[in-house]
Image (cartoon, rainbow, N blue to C red):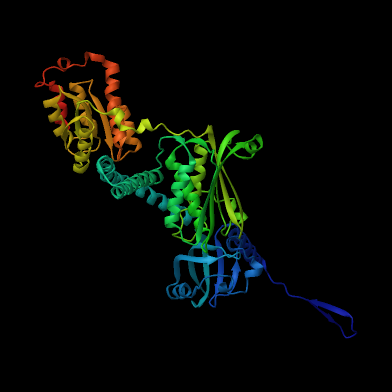
Amino acid sequence: MLLTKNSRGEPDHLVGRLTDITERRDTEEKLTRQAALLDKTRDGIMVLNLDHTIKYWNKGAGAIYGWTAEEALGRRQDELRSTDITLPAELVVEKGEWFGSLKKKTKAGAVLTLDCRWTLLRDEHGEPQAILTVDTDMTERKQMEAKFLRAQRLESIGTLAGGIAHDFNNLLSPIVMGVELLKRTTQGTEAKRIVGSIEESSHRATSLVKQILSFARGEAGARVSVLLAYVIREVESIALRTFPRNIGVRLNIAKDLWLVHADPTQMNQVLMNLCVNARDAMPQGGRLTVAARNVEVDDYMVTTNRGAVAGPHVLLEVSDTGTGISPANLERIFEPFFTTKELGHGTGLGLSTVIGIARDHGGFVNVYSEEGRGSVFKVYLPALGGPAITPNPAVENPGLYLGHGELVLLVDDDAPALSVTKHVLESSGYRVVTAADGANAFSIYHSHRARISVVVTDMMMPVMDGPALVEAIRRVDPHMCFVGASGLGDNYNQIKATEMNLHHFLCKPYTTAALLMAIRASMTERLKRFGSSHREEDRGSASSPPSDAVSYAASRL
């Protein structure tokens, strides 16, 4: 507006100009609404000059990267802890757009995986003016995908481990029983020492296979009365052989340690996982201490530990002098797949497995740690109470279960296992006929069925497997004794054996004592159930089995 005056200096006219700004205001309001909408999205939206200076920064970008718009505007993107974006920027100028993944850092230094979509903006003359970038945080999704793939790999490992375990246990079976035969005839101190070393190695190999299956396939083994001192010494021997020499291992085990009702393999796994974690926390060396003592869990501890029950417990304690755990990580260490180790150096399953096993046994876990001063893991397991009782050695004495000339039909497709088991049974007072598969076994049974007292059969065989053989023979003689065996002692085989009413099932490799005990128990059970009525004349003619049994056996070939 302009005020004009007349010749006397008095105000005369008011000159002004009016401009219609409706369209501009509408445009500004539209841009404001669009900006508000852009701030609603969770994606990080930015506009960059061609020199990578930030012109626009929405709230989504602030939420992802931690920088406010005031901190980001006017700065180059690579100043905000970002990665080198030269190549994507060149590609978007050349082709007009670019899609791909980038890793960028937040203000706090965390590395994010981002799904990026970049578009070139041009002016009214078609010249490149700016770059519009839309970043979507894919970090959590990528982590979940990685966990899923890791779980798939573990499942595949479990399947592979099952197949390997079956073959490996078949290989171990003749070794375990062959060593027991050698012990009976070996003379001389040095020879006995060598045989003892072979026996110890075979038992370690057997235990190792069970551990692999237990971890990879999640199998639950039998729970028995366990003295944790034995488990601790087993793990100590492994640690001394495999851990770096700059890590000292110390034990502190109470002499009057109570027994716990537990799965020995899972107890070994708990202790091994804790010791391996302690080893990894001491890259420069240190001291690893494993202790076990009797404690009473009181009402206060019950209220502060989920699932705890008051009463006598055995406390298993693993401590180290390592790097310790930060307070933030301490809250997450028992989460599945959470790990602070570098990629490829940890699965994040060790401690989650520990707490899972402890809770499954009615116990609980506490941890104490300070950065730079080490960690202490305390595993509380309900005790049976009272001092450990030495097992009766007579239970494992094969001499109590020797045969008296009974005829055993032994069926196994593994030739070494068949040969050694036959020798063991014959040296233990039994007569033996052998078969390499179910079909051959049924034929032999047909020829000797009036004299066979028990059938010992492998469950997994070609041509005709163990379950099919058992069912075929039972059609001929419902009273026959059976002992099943398998190199794959998984839940499926044991459930299958139970469904078949096969109460005597051995997991390979088994000891001579276990085999003889199973045979004797099977025959004793038949005697109690059927008495003396199970005679040769009750079985009918040896030359004419029921036609349905023959047809059934033929159908399984």
State the residue lying farthest toward the top. 533
Vertical side of 219 occupied by 348: above or below = below
312 or 494: nearer the eye?
Answer: 312
Image-based side of 114 in relation to 492, left or right: right
Instruction: Please indicate, yes or no, whether residue 501 appears anywhere in the rendered image.
Output: no
Residue 295's spot in the image, x, y percent?
A: 60, 38
| Quadrant of the snapshot with the C terminus | top left
- Residue drawn at (12%, 30%), measured in percent from left and top? 443
Image-based side of 210 in relation to 462, left or right: right
355 or 246: nearer the eye?
Answer: 246
Residue 44's spot in the image, x, y percent?
A: 56, 62
350 or 3: nearer the eye?
Answer: 350
449 or 287: nearer the eye?
Answer: 287
Residue 191's spot in the image, x, y percent?
A: 28, 48
State the residue lying farthest toward the bottom. 7
- Residue drawn at (88%, 86%), measured in percent from left and top? 7
- Residue drawn at (89%, 81%), measured in percent from left and top? 10
| Quadrant of the snapshot with the N terminus | bottom right
Quadrant assignment, res 545: top left
Residue 447's spot in the image, x, y percent?
A: 11, 26
- Residue drawn at (39%, 45%), measured in percent from left and top? 211
Vertical side of 500 occupied by 323: above or below = below
State the residue lying farthest toward the front. 188
Image-based side of 507 in relation to 345, left or right: left
